[in-house]
Every structure is written in structure tokens, then in C-alpha cells.
Image: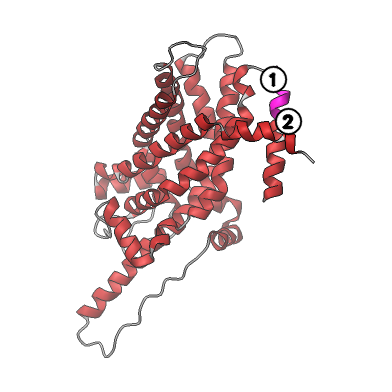
Amino acid sequence: MALWICSWLRFCHALSQEQVTCHEPLISLPAKLINGGIAGLIGVTCVFPIDLAKTRLQNQQNGQRMYTSMSDCLIKTIRSEGYFGMYRGAAVNLTLVTPEKAIKLAANDFFRHHLSKDGKKLTLLREMLAGCGAGTCQVIVTTPMEMLKIQLQDAGRIAAQKKLMAAQAQLSSSSAAGAAEPVVEARTTATQITRELLRSKGIAGLYKGLGATLLRDVPFSIVYFPLFANLNKLGQKDPNVKAPFYVSFLSGCVAGSTAAVAVNPCDVIKTRLQSLQRGVNEDTYSGILDCTKKIWQKEGPMAFLKGAYCRALVIAPLFGIAQVVYFIGIAEFLLDILPKHRA
């Protein structure tokens, strides 16, 4: 791992040296990739329990509600699965969040660079097109990452539901001769799920819900990147001077949470479609339209906002943390000292 990190840093440093003569947005690309990865790792670690609560709240259907709120979900999770139960599926995110952020940031810079080749200031439409391109590219990593994460995050909810159903059946069965056999949860890993999906469905199995992921991530990037850029500009006293740290921090939080809530209906659909296991009497879906129709008819329009506040609470700190990492300049420091320590 250390060798891989060192090689990655050297590659990024070499890339930065080659890009000195390029358009300005590309000069800081290597640092953006490293800072984005570091911010992603720190952010996931900090807010993952809230993300777990979001997934479980979105997946539960009417008549099978295990949790009433985010706090209720987290408390019940700790009681039944322990503290580390809140981090089920975190390993998948921690492994894939760096390439995801790298692709997203690199793609956004790439499209902004090529859309501004005429030397003119980027219009709002071009900023949105750049964000659209970034969101489209990132699903290469996002879809399998979300697919695996959701299975692990939701496993505890399904197991708790089965235990509750078994306990209710035992109490209602007065003629039972002995105690019912306890439900034992068979814990699976991301590796086991991946192998099974590849064996049964091939690579397409890991990309279940790709369409819904695109419907979520493309609009998110279309909203986030232009909104952040324009909010951040409000704090710039001079176009050639960066905005103060607190302005960038607040811009990231506001833009991130706004975009997250705006695309939450797509996130609910994506979560439902990517869940391979269902609780007792829960619906299955054949596609985006079927999922949308069943949710609307059986749970009402407000169901599309399930977990919205959790998602906002997840996204805002993630982008706030990213701004802290960028402000400190961890990548710039690493890229600066790298040549001094070459063998």
C-alpha cells in the first residue's frame, strides 16, 4: 500500500510538472485528486453512520417500519449490532471513494478546461455541462460502490425485522411445544457479494441500478458545481484572489446539501432498485418506472423524501471537510516534499 501511494504521488507530481504550460484549471489537478481522496476518506469515516441510517430509512416500506427517525435507527443499530454496526459497508466506501472523487474532480476540470478554450468566462450553461460530464463519468465507480454498500448497510435492518417477526410468531403461538429457534444472521462481506454477482450475472450484476445512479449523480453535479462556483465567487473581493476559507466552506455545505435534497427522490429509487434482499412483504421492482409507480401509489409522494435530511447531513460535512483539506493544502505539501525524498 505504501509503495502504491508513493507511486501515485510521484505520478501526480510528474503530471503537475508537465501541465505547467496548460490552461490554469489543469495545473492543480494532481493536488485536487489527492486532496479529494483524502477528504473522501476523512468524510466517509465521520458521516458514515448517518449514511447507514439514510439507507435503512429509505428501504423500509409501509407496514414494515423498523425505525421512526435517524436517531431511532442509530440507537437501535448500536443496541442490536454494537457500535461498529454503524460502519457496516464502510470498507467498500473507504476503498472506492478515492477513485470516485478522483474521477469526478478530474472530469469536471477536464470539461471546464475544454469548454473555456475560447478564452471566454464560463457561462452557467457551460458550467452545468461540465458538471453533467463529471457526474456521468463518476458512475463508473459509484454504481458498484453503492451497490455493495447498500447490501451491507441494509442487512442489519432485514435481520432485525426477521427477529421481530420470529418473536411475534412465538408469542402468538400458544400451542408451541418449545421455544422457537432463534434467527441467526449470516454476515456476508463485500467480497462474497461481488463473487456471487459476478458468478450469477457477470459484470452487469455490479451495475444494477446504473440508470437510477445516473439520474441521481448527473443532476447532482449539474446543481452542485455551478452553485458552489457562483456562491464562492460572492466572497471574492478580487477575481484574481481566492475567497476566504469560511466562504468556501459555507459554499460547499450549502451547495452540497441543496443538491442532495434536490435529487433525493432519485436516490430513494436507486436505493430500492439496488437492494438485493427484501424484508417480509416488501415490494420488488422491475425498473425505474415500476419503482416510481409503486412508491407513489403505496407510500405516497412524501416517500420520495425519505432520508432527505440524513442525506443533507451527510453531504454538507463531506464538502465542508473537503474545503478544510483544500485549505490546509495537504496534497501541495506532499507534492512539494516528494522530490526531496526520492531514492
Which stretch appears magenta? 15-21
Pointers 1 and 2 in contact (C-beta within 8 Å): no
Q: Is residue 171 left or right of residue 267?
A: left
Q: Is residue 166 left or right of residue 201?
A: left
**Relative depth, front residue between 227 and 132:** 227
Neighbour tally class for label 1: few under 14, some 14-19, many 20 plus, Cα within 10 Å:
few
Mark 2 highlights which residue?
14
Tag of residue 257: none
Neighbour tally class for label 2: few under 14, some 14-19, many 20 plus, Cα within 10 Å:
few
Task: Tell me residue 327's x, y (percent).
Answer: 50, 29
Q: Is residue 58 left or right of residue 195?
A: left
Task: Tell me residue 210's x, y (percent).
Answer: 50, 43
Q: Outermost residue, bottom direction?
A: 177
Mark toward the start of the polypeptide (1 vs 2): 2
Kindly state the secondary structure of the residue where label 1 is placed.
Answer: loop
User: In percent of the image, x 30 and y 56: which residue is there?
Assistant: 73
Task: Tell me residue 119's x, y (percent).
Answer: 59, 9
Which amino acid is tagged 1? Val
The answer to whether one can see residue 279 in this image is: no
**Relative depth, front residue between 333 and 90:** 333
User: In percent of the image, x 61 and y 30: which residue is there?
Assistant: 332
Q: Is residue 333 above or below residue 199?
A: above
